[in-house]
Image (cartoon, rainbow, N blue to C red):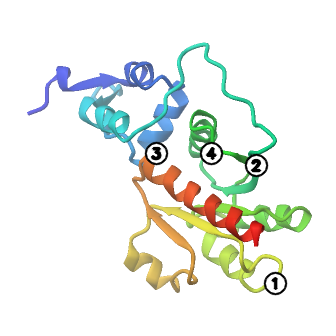
Amino acid sequence: MLSLKDTCSTREAAKRLNVALSTVQAWVEIGALQAWKTPGGHRRILNSSVDKLLNEGMTLPRPGSKYAESTPEVIVVRTLIVEDEHLTRQMYAEIIKHQKLPISASFCENGYQALLRIGNEIPELIITDLSMPEMDGFEMIRALRQFKLTEAIPIIVVSGLTDSEIKVEGGLPEGVLLLHKPVYTSQLCQAIRDALSQIKTKSAQ
């Protein structure tokens, strides 16, 4: 049976991970941190899940440290992140900042908003959820794959749906990368870096 020494509070986890309290809450929501609520309504987080997140290779900033500014050699990739959960959008922003990913991110809450945004500016990379209101990720991705200007945009899907649930909805087009929640920072960042590498290779051809 777990004891209090096996767990920590949300604030204690934020201090250990050196991230904002909202980031820890977002990681709990997507399953990156294992937690539950006590009968009194307080959230407790497993120390082992905090340890695992630290051991996954997160680059955590020191308090007061400044991030290196982009140099002319760094290609900043326009990235659209489509996610209806506010805390998860915050989590993405924190990861991009802390991991110094060379992307310029904009955010939309559903597929409909994303298509409107894409109509004004075409992103070079899309990261999206599948289950969203108004227009879900399935419908948005299918729409993008129908048009010449957007058919080749690399897409990373981060979803809590199972493979069978995705299959029932018609599946995902070939070439779309699927990451199942819970997804750890290192896994997500590696997928983004792989996509950036492919984009860089194509732009050099």
Label 3 secondary element: helix
Label 2 secondary element: loop
Mark 2 or mark 3, earlier in chain: 2
Distance between the alpha carbons at the discs numbered 2 and 3: 20 Å
Q: Is residue 24 above or below residue 76?
A: above
Q: Which mark is residue 89?
A: 4
Q: Nearer the viewer, mark 1 or mark 4?
A: 1
Mark 4 or mark 3, earlier in chain: 4
Which residue corresponds to mark 2?
Answer: 76
Mark 2 or mark 4, earlier in chain: 2
Q: Is residue 143 above or below residue 4?
A: below
Asked if labels 3 and 4 touch by Cβ distance under 8 angstroms, the answer is no
Distance between the alpha carbons at the discs numbered 4 and 3: 14 Å
Which residue corresponds to mark 3?
Answer: 185
Which residue corresponds to mark 1?
Answer: 148
Q: Nearer the viewer, mark 1 or mark 2?
A: 2
Q: Residues within 10 Å of mark 4 (few under 14, many from 20)?
A: some
Q: Position of residue 189 (x, y in %)?
A: 52, 50
Distance between the alpha carbons at the discs numbered 2 and 4: 19 Å
